Amino acid sequence: MQINTWHFGTSTSTAHVIATWGDLYSTSRDVTAEARWTSSSPDIMAVTGPGAFTSVSPGDADVRAEFNGVAVVQSLRVYVGEGPLMVTDCANPSSCFYTDAVRDSTRSFPSDGIEGATVTITSGHNAGRSAVTDTNGYFQFFSPLVWGPITIRASKSGYRDGEVSWIMGETSSPPLLLVPQTN
C-alpha cells in the first residue's frame, strides 16, 4: 500500500490524499475511501474525511492510512498561514536527504564538480542550512527537509555566486552552476 498523490490547498489549508493497494500480480486500486485515516496530532492536522485533512495549528503531524492490516505514514509540517507541507520520511531511505552537485558553467556537462563550494539554503522552510561540496562537487542536506519553495546559493572563491530556485518535491532542481570570475 502507498500514499501516492497529495493535493495541498494553500488558501484552505487542506490536503487530499489517494491511497492505492497493490497485490502480488501488480494490479492496484484506489482504496482511499476504504482505508482508515488517522493523524498523530489532531490538534495540528485533523482528519476531515477519507484522505482529507485540515491544518489546525503550526507543528508536525504524521498522517496514517491503514488498509487490510497494512499501514503507511507520511510526516507533514504545518506553518502559520500556509497549508501542510510534506516532510522527508527516513522510513524511505531515498527521501532521507537531498543531494546535488555544484558545477563549473564553462565545462561540458556532466563535468567534474567544484570541490569546496559552500552551499546554503537561503529561502524556504529549510533556510539557514548549509553544506560544503566534496571532491566531486556533491553536497547533501539531510532529513528532515520540508517540501515547498526553496532557493539554494553556492559560492567559492574565484567564481561568481550561483543560485537556483524551485519547488522541492514537485519539480526537479535546476543545475547549480558557478561562473569563473574574470580579471
Image (cartoon, helix red, strand yellow):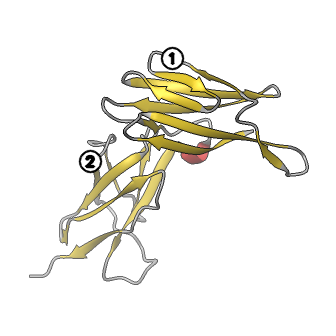
Q: Is residue 36 left or right of residue 130?
A: right
CA–CA distance between discs 1 and 2?
Answer: 29 Å
Position of the C terminus, as image quadrant, is bottom left
Q: Secondary structure at mark 2?
A: strand
In the depicted view, which residue is nearer to us: 10 or 122?
Answer: 10
Residue that label 1 marks? 42
Q: Is residue 10 above or below residue 69?
A: below
Q: Quadrant of residue 18?
A: top right
Residue nearest the viewer, comparing 81 with 129: 81
Q: Residues within 10 Å of mark 2 (few under 14, many from 20)?
A: some
Looking at marks 1 and 2 on the same chain, the residue that comes earlier in the sequence is marked by 1
Kind of residue at badge 2: Ser
Residue at the spot 16% in from the left edge and 76% down from the top edge: 181
Q: Residue at 46% across / 50% down in the picture?
A: 98
The structure residue drawn at horizontal position 51% and vertical position 36%, both measured from the top left corner, is 15
Name the residue: 57% across, 31% down: 52
Q: Is residue 169 above or below residue 114?
A: above
Which amino acid, mark 1? Pro
Residue 131 picture location, percent across and down:
33, 49
Q: Quadrant of the N terminus?
A: top right
Count of numbered badges drawn on the protein: 2
Q: In the rendered view, would you say 110 is above or below 52?
A: below
**Residues tagged 1 and 2 counted as in contact (Cβ below 8 A):** no
- Disc on res. 123: 2
Residue 16 position within the rendered picture, expressed as x and y whole percent measured from the top left:
56, 38
Relative to 109, say whether 45 is above or below: above
For label 1, the SS is loop
Q: Nearer the viewer, mark 1 or mark 2?
A: 1
On screen, residue 160 versus residue 176, left or right, reads left
* Circle 1 crowding by C-alpha within 10 Å: few under 14, some 14–19, many from 20: some
Q: Residue furthest left?
A: 183
The answer to which quarter of the image holds residue 106 is bottom left
